[in-house]
Image (cartoon, rainbow, N blue to C red):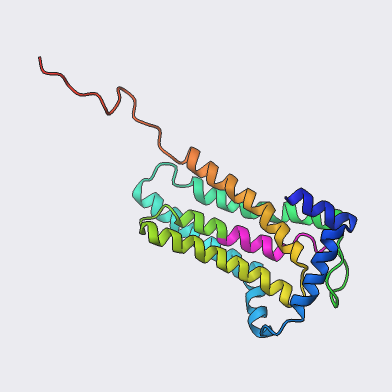
Amino acid sequence: MFALVTWQVAVGGPLRRVDERVGRDLAGSRFPEGVAEFLADLGNLVVAVPVLVAVIAYVGSRGRRAGAYRWWLGPVAAAGAMVLVPLLVVPLKAAVARPGPPGMAGDGYYPSGHTATATVAYGAAALLLLPLPHGAYGRRALLCGCAVLNLGVGFGLVRRGYHWPLDVVASWLLFAVLLRVLLGVTTRFGTPPPPSGGSSGDVAQPK
């Protein structure tokens, strides 16, 4: 999906034309600009990254005190995912060189860096907090809250005319894959190996 969207944006295909029409309609909507600006600002580095840093510090400290198996893996992997954001976004912006919405100068708006920052920062924070003991309802609320927050950031960016909708969608598609890799790494390498020396199902037989 990311490759398809990128191709359409790069060649000016029909999907891009629909995208720009929808973007202009959303930017001209009656949704309050102040609320949209607040939502868009949640994707700023100075807002999103400190949230992730705080969660990394909390989860790492908690795991170290508890003597958890490879307690450092999740925090390190989350920090690495955040470092990858500019390394992926900046070359793509330069390669596609998409002009911004009306009123925005220059090009390099695809994919959205603010969306990428929010997706990875809030998504990685949610994944780090997910294993903590807060019940199935708490885990669902955490994931739903993360999704709603990222949807709000994307909508705010489009409503304020900072990005086209596909700029936002592309970052969601690309960095959802990165979060899936993060989850796979922490699940596979952060789980203690089973104890050696017989299975737990062995039952001692009477002599």
Up the image or down, 116 lies above or below 73; here it is below
Horizontal side of 33 relative to 74 (left or right) equals right
Q: Is residue 115 visible?
A: yes
Residue 113 magenta-drawn? Answer: yes
Say which of 170 and 130 sits in front: 170
Quarter assignment of residue 149: bottom right
Q: Which residues are magenta?
A: 108-122
Quarter assignment of residue 141: bottom left
> Residue at the spot x=87%, y=57% of the render?
13
> Residue at the spot x=87%, y=55% of the render?
10
Q: Number of marks in the image?
A: 0
Residue 85 magenta-drawn? Answer: no
Instruction: Kindly report the secondary structure that dominates the magenta region of the rendered protein.
Output: helix
Picture coordinates of residue 179, whole percent (x, y): 59, 51
Q: Is residue 44 visible?
A: no
Say which of 90 and 139 sits in front: 139
Horizontal side of 177 relative to 15 (left or right) equals left
